[in-house]
Amino acid sequence: GLPGIALTTDSSTLTSIANDTEFRHIFSKQVTALGQPGDLLLAICSSGHSANIIEAIHAANKSDIAVIALTGQDGGLIDQVLNSNSVEIRVPSTVTARIQEVHSLVIHILCELLDLQLLGPTE
């Protein structure tokens, strides 16, 4: 197995960061505290305009953490904050449901590629 953390699942952490600072920092504070150079941040945002995702990408950039950004529509502001250590996979649709369906497929493909690259074929 490979280690991974979902930054959305710890309600105590999320509410304490939101209450003590600002909601837009709920992910960036965790990236700064937990992330290490060489890690990977998977940032998912249908519109590309969520301030909390943009702040997380800024934190990843400062910590030498690569970013894969899954966006939709025109990529929003996320496209402007990605650096050369980042990849954007954009779904060119304005329908949120379609964007999220493609994001789900892309996540499964990325998991499969990571398994193959890091762990080799299972057969």
Image (tube, rainbow, N blue to C red):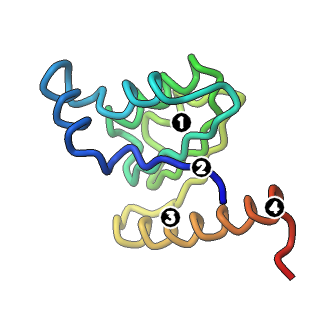
Mark 4 surroundings within 10 Å by alpha-carbon count, few (fewer than 14), some (14 through 19), many (20 or more)? few
Residue closest to the far left? 19
Q: Secondary structure at mark 3?
A: helix
Q: Position of residue 21 (x, y in %)?
A: 20, 19
Circle on res. 103: 3
Q: Nearer the viewer, mark 4 or mark 3?
A: 4
Q: Nearer the viewer, mark 1 or mark 3?
A: 3
Mark 1 vs mark 4: which is more N-terminal? 1
Mark 2 vs mark 1: which is more N-terminal? 2
Residue closest to the far bottom? 123
What amino acid is labelled 4 in the image? Leu
Mark 1 vs mark 3: which is more N-terminal? 1
Q: Where 122 sits versus 54, above or below?
A: below
Give the residue number, with chain letter if any, for mark 4.
119
Circle on res. 61: none
Q: Secondary structure at mark 1?
A: helix
Mark 4 vs mark 3: which is more N-terminal? 3
Q: Residue at x 55, y 40 (%)?
A: 41
Circle on res. 3: 2
Mark 2 vs mark 4: which is more N-terminal? 2
